[in-house]
Amino acid sequence: MLIKTNAIVLSTLKYGDSSLIARCYCKELGLKSFMLKSILSSKKGQLKKSLFQPLNIITLITKIKNENKDGLHFIKEARICFPLIEIPSDIKKNTVALFLSEVMSRVITEEGAPNQILYHFIEKKIIFLEQKVFSPLFHLKFMTDLSHHLGFYPNQSNLKEEYFDLESGCFCSSSCSKYVIGGDLVMTLKKILGANFEDLNHLKIHNSLRSRVLNVLVDYFNLHLHGIGKIKSLDILHEIFR
C-alpha cells in the first residue's frame, strides 16, 4: 500500500559505504525509519542527501506492507514541502535546529503510533523558527511545550510557590527531593512557561542564566523519560550562546 505523507527529518545514520538510514516523524505514520540505499554515491537517483537535513519538512511516498508495518522502509519519492533558508544559513538558528532534532530523536522513540497533534506542533514551530526574528529562548520554550505533548508538562496549580521539584513536576514551598530548584532558575522557568513564542524577544534573560535553565530542562527530560542520555549538541549550543 502506497502512502503519501508529510514528514519531519529527525536524524540520519550512515549505513555501509553509501547508504543512510533516516528517522522521520511522519504526519500519517508516526515515527518511521527509512533506508536510503546508495544515496551517498548515486548522482542520478531521485533522492538527494540534501532532502534529509535535520528538521527538513518533506513530502514522501512510501510503501507499507500490511504484514510489516515496523522495521526499515523505502521511500519511493520525496520532495521538500516547506523550503528552509534561514535555518541552514543562520548559525544560531542552525545550532538550535541541530539541538532540537537531537532532543526529539532521543525522546520520540516509539515507531508508528501517529500523533498528528504532536506533528503539527513540531512543524508549526520549525516554520516559526525559520520565518521569525530569532530568540535565544526559542529552544527553552520549545522544550517546555514539547513536555506537554509527552505527558510531563510542569503542574502550574501552585505557580506562586518559590521552588520547583523536577521529580514531581510541581511547584512547591519545600521538598525533600534532591531535584529541587529555586531562586533565579524558578523565576526564569515561570517566565518561559507564561510566555508565548511571539513574546520571547521581550524577555531579557542573561546568557549564563539561560544556559543554567537549559541544563535544568535537560535534567527534567532525563528524569521523566528514564534517561535520554547525554545530548551531544548541548556543549555546542552553550558555546554559540556564551
Image: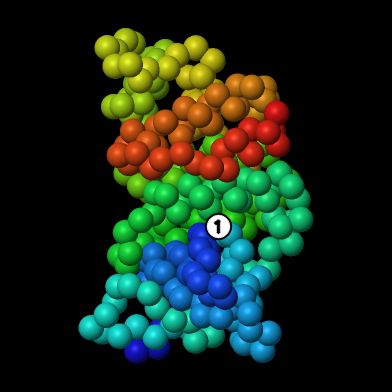
Compared with 42, 71 (above or below) is: above
Quarter of the image with the N terminus in it? bottom left
Whether residue 170 is visible here, answered yes or no, is yes
Q: Which residue corresponds to mark 1?
A: 124
Image coordinates of residue 142 in percent, x first then y, are 52, 43
In percent of the image, x 62 and y 75: which residue is there?
A: 40
User: Which residue is at a point 69% across and 48% down the rendered structure image?
Assistant: 93
8 lies above or below 221: below
Give the residue at the far front of this rendering.
Answer: 17
Q: Residue at x 53, y 42 (%)?
A: 232
**Badge 1 amino acid:** Lys
Q: Residues within 10 Å of mark 1 (few under 14, many from 20)?
A: few
Residue 198, given in percent of the width and then of the height, sits at 63, 42
Q: Is residue 120 left or right of residue 45?
A: left
Provide the secondary structure element on which disc 1 rests: helix
Q: In the visual, does 160 lie left or right of 88?
A: left
Above or below: residue 87 compared with residue 154: below
